[in-house]
Image (cartoon, grey):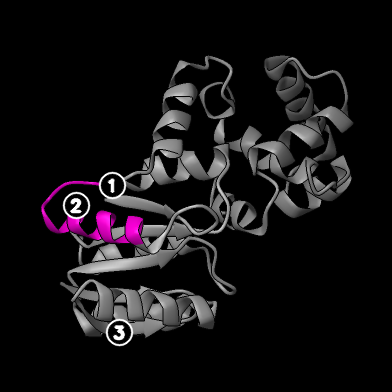
Amino acid sequence: MRIAIVEDERLFRDVLRKACTMELGHEVVGEAGTGREALQVVPAALPDLLLLDIHLPDMDGLDVLRVLRRKRALLRTLLISSYFDEYTLCRIEQAAVQGFIDKSTNTVAELGLAIRAIEGGSTYFPSPFTEARRAHSRNPMAFDKILTDREQVVLSLIGEPLSDAEIAAQLNLSPETIEKHRFNIMRKLGLRSRAESARFARRCGLTRPAARRHFSAVN
């Protein structure tokens, strides 16, 4: 297959290239280390498969994918991440990609299995991902099931931690509106304090720059 690699860590990008070409027999037709570079390189390379890091230094990887799919809707994508949490799981599910590799736990052999599966028209998600997905689907209290998009925005900022006034200024809302959102969040999640809310946001992975960029477009 013709493969494009978008990965900001130069050493790991070299590992991916060598694994794809020397060990797996594919052709790497384009490489990028940032999201903006990917938006130029990938459309020109016309890859059969995109290996895409979710967390890039200048853009969120899934935002990059959305832009690329405006030009090529059926672009097959294998996502790569250095960490995996509930928020990442939800975003991967929504992205409708063909596979996921965890840089922290998966091996080059598993990368090969993923690429072969996608090449054959299937998908590849490692067992920890599928187990987490099943647990998430069975959990009626999963944050994305009971919080609105706006409440998820607010919760992500509570985890910074930011005050109600600071969150209000960032979202162009009144402090009273933020306070109402905060109490609704605590009620829905069974949280007793602002500190508990902040810990919940961090544990789920909501409090990351990628999360804030993703939610910034929510009205």
Q: Amino acid at mark 2?
A: Ala
Residue range corresponding to the magenta coloring: 109-123
Badge 3 element = strand
Of marks 2 and 3, the one in the foreground: 2
At x 11%, y 54%, the residue is 120
Residue 197 on image: x %, y %: 79, 30
What secondary structure predominates along the stretch shown in magenta? Answer: helix
Report the front residue among 27 and 158: 27
Q: Is residue 152 magenta?
A: no
Q: Is residue 116 magenta?
A: yes
Residue ID for mark 1: 124
Residue ID for mark 3: 30
Q: Is 103 left or right of 16, judged from the image as shown?
A: right
C-alpha distance separating marks 1 and 3: 22 Å
Q: Looking at the image, is 89 positioned above or below residue 103?
A: above
Residue ID for mark 2: 117
Q: Quadrant of residue 19?
A: bottom left
